[in-house]
Amino acid sequence: ELVQMTPFAKRKPHQLSGGQRQRVALARSLIKRPKVLLLDEPLGALDKKLREQTQLELLNIQSKVGITFVIVTHDQEEAMTLADRISVMDRGRIQQLGTPAEIYEFPKNRFVANFIGSVNLFEATLAVDEPDRAELDSIDFGQRIHVGHGVTGTIGMEFSVAVRPEKIRMSRKPLPDLPNQTQGVIKQIVYLGDISTYFIETASGKQVRVTQPNLDRWAEGEFTWEDRVYIGWAADGGVVLAQ
């Protein structure tokens, strides 16, 4: 039996808040004891804080009643929070199926890498391919990219190297312990409280997104617009994508 709950299905009296209406709709669905519960954008009408609270409630309910939830959502954060397994779809086709960590850390293609979270994609061609390492020439990055494993492909084959913003380190000085590094100029800073995102333009004109945690109260003051900085990542910090 498959029971569907939609955000606006059978609303209760108008004095109920959006969150209360969602809870009532969920309770009505659970009374029937379905084996599978389909939630179609269940939290779309809620504000951010209430959405986060309701996400935790859904997790608690699911663990207590043992019903399989199938959740349809365009909210990436919601999917990562609620799901044991995620199916990323494009035009009706499944692009990747896996755990949140697998989807985020090891995307299978450019679409998945772009769709889930933020990512930097560097176009490159394979130059060296050995069992335990590979090197790719990249005009985007302006340097040869080093990878800590072999790549299935032929020399000269085109790839994309996907690097998450939080995997990239930034410093005013060279980063000798990182095999992949280049210089750039900070063109924009977005302060988000717990983190700051820096948009750094390299010599090739490529804009690289770097995310840094604000560990100190005034951490965002360490770097500012037009600062020249070094950026880099470890050999296992990127994912090589053929598609």
Image: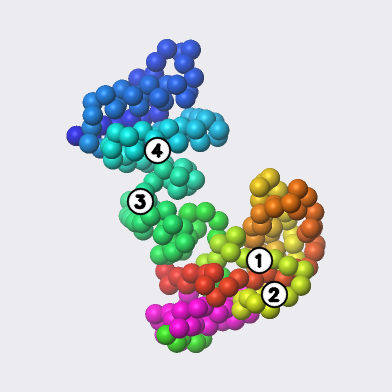
**In this view, 35 is above or below 136:** above
- The spot of residue 18 in percent (x, y) is 48, 23
- How many residues crowd around disc 1 within 10 Å: few (fewer than 14), some, or many (20 or more)? some
Q: The residue under label 2 is which amino acid type? A: Leu
- Residue 240 circle label: none
Sequence order check, earlier mark of 4 and 3 = 4
Q: The residue under label 3 is which amino acid type? A: Arg
Spatial CA distance of label 3 from label 1 is: 30 Å
Which residue matches tag 3?
A: 85
Spatial CA distance of label 3 from label 2 is: 37 Å
- Residue 59 circle label: 4
Which residue matches tag 1?
A: 169
What residue lies at 39% left-to-right and 46% top-to-bottom? 83
Sequence order check, earlier mark of 1 and 2 = 1
- Residue 175 circle label: 2
Q: Is residue 92 visible?
A: yes
Sequence order check, earlier mark of 3 and 1 = 3
Spatial CA distance of label 2 from label 4 is: 42 Å
Label 1 with label 2: CB-CB less than 8 Å: yes
Q: Is 156 within the magenta?
A: yes
